[in-house]
Amino acid sequence: MVHLTTYSDNKRKSTQTLLQEVYTAMQAGETEFEIDASGQHNIGGPLWRTDGQPLKFYVRNPGQRVGSMGMPGTEIVVEGSAPADVGWLNAGATITVKGDGGDTTGHCAADGIIYIGGRAGTRTGSLMKHDPAFNPPQLWILKNTGSFPFEFMGGGIAVVCGHDADESASVLGERACVGMVGGIIYVRGHIGKLPSNVKLVETLEKEDWDFLTDGMPKFLRAVERADLNATMLAQSEWRKIVPKSYEELKQGKRRHSLGEFRANRWIQGGLFGDVVEDAGNVIPLVAMGKYRTHSPVWNNAVFAAPCEYACPSYIPTQDRINLLRKGKIRDALDLVLSYNPFPGSVCGAACPNPCMTACTRQHIDFAVLAGPLGKYSMDLPAPTPDVHTGKRFAVIGSGVGGLSAAWQLALRGHTVTIYEKENSLGGKMAHAIPHGRLEQEIVQAEIRRILSLGVQVELGIEITREFFQQIRDLCDGVIIAIGAHTPRKIPFPGSERTHSALEFLTSANDGTPVVSVAGRSVIVIGAGDVGMDACATAWQLGATSVTAIDIQEPASASREREAAMALGTQVVWPRTTLEYRDEEIFFKEGGSLPADVVIVAIGEVPDTAWLPENFARVKNNWLATDEIGRTRDPRVFAVGDVVKPGLLTQAIGAGRVAALALHAEVMGEKFELPRKQAIPREKLNLIYFTPRLSQCPTDPLSETSRCISCGTCRDCNICVAICGQNAITRYEHANGAYEFRVDEEHCIGCGFCSAACPSGIWTMVPNLFEETVKE
Amino acid sequence: MATIKADEIKLAPQNNGNDKVNGLRVPSAPSTHIIKPTFVRDSHAMDFPWKIKWNAETCIRCGSCVATCTFGAIKPQLQRKGQALSTGHLPSPIEATEVIMAIKQVNDPKYYCRGCEMCEKVCPTDSIKPVPNEQHRFPLVARHGGSPIKRGGRGHHIPIRVLDYIKVGRISQMTDPSLDAARHTFDLLTPLGRGLPADELPFKVENGKLVPGGSIPPMRWIYPVIIGDMSVGALSWRMWEALALAVAYLNEECKMPVRMSSGEGGMPSRLLKSEFLKYFIIQIASGHFGWNRIIKAMPEMVTDPAAILIKIGQGAKPGDGGLLPAEKVASHIQAIRGVPKADLMSPPNHQGLYSIEESVQKMFLSMNAAFKFRVPVAIKVAASSTSVAVFNNLVRDPYQIVGGYFLDGIQGGTGAAHEVSMDHTGHPILSKLRDCYLAAVDQGKQGQIPLFVGGGFGDTGDLAADAFKAICLGANGVFSAKIWLQLAGCVGNEKGRCNACNTGYCPVGICTQDHRLVARLDVDAVAQNIVDYFLALDQELKKLMAPIGNSTLPIGRSDALVSMSKSAAERLQIAYAC
């Protein structure tokens, strides 16, 4: 035993000097040291003898880190207390402090035993570890610790006996065991809140108790408190703190999942369940069925083709072409007859063909030959009505309007009688239009087709007011189609020596012109269609010059004017006639023109004086009707020029509408004017169609390749082909009709079908969500 | 007697016969169905902020992109491909054209591409995507019809984010050792409610013990990151519910007292009557929307709300009232707000308030009284040059009824606003936060009226850092909103992507009331993302508190910050570092 003091000459030895004295003594063979220290650090370690003999240190008043890095075989006994870091990194020494230990006692100890006979400071036992190749470190404390003990403890055994501790305060101070992941703390006495990474075990196992009962007497003997043996070995007062295992920690972290929380704790039915209906399903960005933003609609024939829309007789030429396309030639040719009994004489000859003027195809190359197609229907027999209704109708007047009405009524099985003032049928079509422009054989053949339905005719009948009343009483309905035959006149001086164009044309057609124009100069006042017909007729009858004048830019359609101009007609406007004198005609604008013959072509007015007073009239002459031709008497309709001057096709269309409306009226059916909107051009996809400007069409029956089929499905199946979802299917019904259907549950609403449809059938519409309003 | 001269004779317009082939009229104008005429006046994708790039070679024509685009910005369109060619050794033309389907950008400013990239997201072959068009002329084509540009989202012309120049520069190392963020216990809570100085606390001593001797203003200790006010209506019902669900979960399961402001569109009745109400701050704005249902629900409330927030202004569009476009006023919104389908414009100010003093007396008093003085009442104003004056007035608060001052900066978001307001009005938040805090410090009254700030916090995705810096500058906490939407799938950003919150066509189902779009949003997934973000944010806040050695919120600890911008350092009175 060597005794070392740390003062000499009233001067304190440094730690280094003291420790070097220890090293020197050890080399001299010393194994036991009694050190009277004065705060020197690191007394007791790391020291060892190569022969393995144990080392013993008896220390008073040590500095920090007494016993630090202490080795196995080293025993250190501190009389009284020691400051911080007793046994720091203890690697096997047995260290006894009979008084208190300072802060971080046992800090990072990994082997050996530390006995503290009093209290230990803050952060005691922090980061203790246990290397499985060696013994676990032990840290015994008789009383209590400061705050934050056993932080991040990773192994070893600590025993806090709780002797002489304030009963109300925690024997582990505040915030013990933060971050503790290993080791065991046996504790006796009150403890405060523990963090979630450890658990407090209330009842000790046998091996725990074995450890305590084995170690406790040694500890108490070491710190000279064997008197407490019995007190300390009351098993029920002991508990232990152990860290949760890695698995327990994971388990402990496991909260209820959000789904569980929502299912069990959250407001049932959702926050907004009372005001919004929401099934709660989550859809992908590309959605099908009701969650698509848009859905396609097969709007077949919802819009009118431009030809159909432009035709006053509503003839759906695109339907005729579609039938041709399917090889149903007879059906195609028959179809026109249900709209117009004059396909040969009107469509194919006299009509200016607004259908072709409107045709979409002309914006690519040439209009589809809709007019000439009419000629193919002129020789077809009339359909046979399948019913006879027994209803009687009278048609007054046999122009195209009246004949059209008679045709439609007869086709529906009604009994029709036509009353005609003249001695032949056909009105202006038969009499006023130059025969050179309209072959009378065709007109008469088509009139015979109408009569073949059993339509009766009374010719040479001048209708009086009384006779009209009789007819009205006798029949289920009357259609007035008397036309307009009273020429309008301009009362300029000399006008009594002019001729009306209607007289001139009718008489010329009959071969007995009212005035001879051969070799004479002719002035035609009024440059409309009839005026142009008069001009052309004057040329044909040998006129030397023909000039048409008008007070404004002429409104004549091109066909009549082209014929007249081609013969040399000059058109002059604006010219307002002042006087006709000395075979010269004078104008308000100045100047005059030679005029051997003056023909006035400014229109005709109807003679409706014979009708009862209660029929409303426009400007005292024309009959007032609603848009379907109905007069104030719901069973009396008026069509054609008696209502408003117009084209033949307009009279035909009006006659058909009036007939259908009357039919509905007497049959008790509902009638709606069948008028669709024209399809907007931008809905069509014309890009498929290559212009063929070098191949002018000549064969109406071959127009299937050129007709766009605007607004009506052409059955090309492009939509079926382009749909990436295979969601479009063509369904054919037993009667041959077909439709394209969408499988809504597969359609994503991309709009390819609509973008690809040449005819503008597929239309994308917002896929409106059926929202149920709550409350 | 004059005779007519030849030149006086005018011919009517006519075809002279030369424009006919075989007697048929030829088109009067060249065929336009293949080459569409383009005019200078026509708008074009080149004018728009985003251009669609589409690859015809790789596209499989599945239609997904068009089906997904909610803005109608792309459309399928037939395209003619190829031309007449010659084969062999002589010019011998063959017809080799084909018509194919193409995806085209719609050239109408009404349907301009927002760059939301949903087309790109759904394309199975990566054949389509919007690319930003730096050269666009959109501001010049978007005002057609004399209508100002409106949109949602956030401002695009805010040049810098000062927060990014500020770093946490004072790190405790050898001295006052830093804490272990992972294992130490931190107290992150912040007060919401009127704090009283010790000498004003109504305590008295009875039998040697301190006992309350009067009424104490209510105070809540809450998490310092608040989910900012986004209304029922601005958000889809699913988005709002996901936020509420996340808040409830964070409180109940994670023990994080996160609070959420209702926004100015009222509250769902079911929430008002539930135990979860305590996690929600009910807002009242100038439109007072939804308050009928809130008041009606009072007898059935089982708990008090966390607080009441009086909204005076909003950082994204100060001086403007709330705006909910009619497109979003669906039937349930009509019910909750008590209005028909219409553009819902809140007045720019509360119509009964004419001065700060009056607002304190009237509005604060009313809202305090509404819940019998049990619930803190705070106020939210847009940051402005006048913020300190307003704050000083509130700090005087002789009635002890001002429970918080929420200051909203220019980088905040909005559901709908005029672009000119969003981009050009407003005030950056940090200097006003600092001014207010220091003004309170000067009077020795800091902390008495908690300061919360918002407006761009979390814009880079790092909300913890932004919040921490604001707290060090003197905030008691921050409120943020856009980031939660971004966690839900919002693709909007400060560079002009999407921001179509005002249109009702939100492609991800967040800012729309359209069932077809709302169904795209997964409530559970959104709530989970928000919960996860909060849990991470909590760790990150500690990760910032630990190095500066604070285990409680470092409110006003500006010594922890350094600024890499000298001017910002001077303005904020923090250290400059480079």
Image: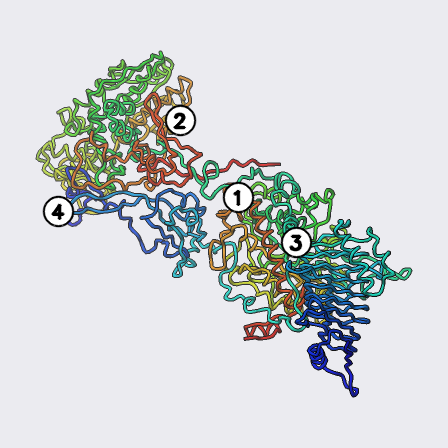
Task: Choose mark 3 or mark 2, whichever is in front.
Answer: 3
The image shows residue A633 at horizontal and vertical percentages of 40, 22
Q: Which mark is residue B88?
A: 4
Task: Choose mark 1 or mark 4, whichever is in front.
Answer: 4
- Amino acid type of the residue that numbered disc 4 sits on in the rendered structure: Gly
The local secondary structure at tag 1 comes to helix
Question: Do circles 3 and 1 both sit on a common chain?
Answer: yes
The local secondary structure at tag 2 comes to loop
Sequence-wise, the earlier of marks 3 and 1 is: 3
The image shows residue A336 at horizontal and vertical percentages of 27, 25
Q: Is residue A125 above or below residue B117?
A: below
Sequence-wise, the earlier of marks 1 and 4 is: 4
Task: Name the residue nearer the viewer: B536 or B88.
Answer: B536
Disc 2/disc 4 C-alpha distance (Å): 63 Å
Q: Which residue is mark 2?
A: A672
Q: Which mark is residue B258?
A: 3
- Image quadrant in which you'd find residue A643: top left
Task: Name the residue nearer the viewer: A459 or A416.
Answer: A416
Mark 1 is surrounded, within 10 Å at the Cα level, by few (under 14), some (14 to 19) or many (20 or more) other residues, namely: many
Disc 4/disc 3 C-alpha distance (Å): 79 Å
Mark 3 is surrounded, within 10 Å at the Cα level, by few (under 14), some (14 to 19) or many (20 or more) other residues, namely: many
Circle 1/circle 2 CB separation < 8 Å:
no
Q: Which mark is residue B518?
A: 1
